[in-house]
Amino acid sequence: MRSLAAVLALGAAFTLTPAFVQAAPAQAHVQKIAEKKAHAMHGTVSSVDGDTVTVSIENKKTGTKKDHPVKTDSNTKVTVDGKDAKVSDLKAGMLVSITPGTEKGAAASQIEATSAAKS
């Protein structure tokens, strides 16, 4: 009876081992994706309308500028010249660095602005 139980336990161990071995690389891949940080956008504020900040970003290769709407929410951290601020404190012409939210299409997680454009 003991030998039958031992054989069944070993059989189960060998049967389940490939599932655990395959799950580990998949989990590592998912974790790497989650750890990737989104790249910040850098540009100039074109306008602010409620919770949407429109930012003009220059294409470095072509020199053309394109406006990009950026959603914000109550969790978006905004600073102007290093001091805490609100979205409504952002004004056209300010230079900004925007950290996108963690999910695609999510509101920005952080907006850092400087009050004067550099010459």
Image (tube, grey):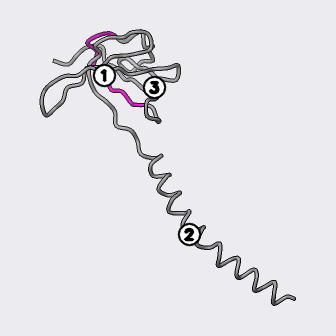
Whether the magenta-drawn stretch holds residue 70 is answered as no
The local crowd at label 2, few if under 14, some if 14 to 19, many if 20 or more residues have their Cα within 10 Å, is few
> According to the image, label 2 marks what residue?
21
- Vertically, is 39 above or below 83? below
- 41 vs 36, left or right, is left
C-alpha gap between disc 1 and disc 3:
13 Å
Quadrant where the C terminus sits is top left
The quadrant holding residue 15 is bottom right
Q: What residue sits 56% from the left and 69% below the top?
A: 21
> According to the image, label 1 marks what residue?
68
**How many numbered markers are drawn?**
3
Q: Amino acid at mark 1?
A: His
| Image coords of residue 39 (percent x, y) | 34, 37
| Image coords of residue 65 (percent x, y) | 19, 22
Secondary structure category for the residue under label 2: helix
Residue bounds of the magenta highlight: 91-100
- 113 vs 78, left or right, is left
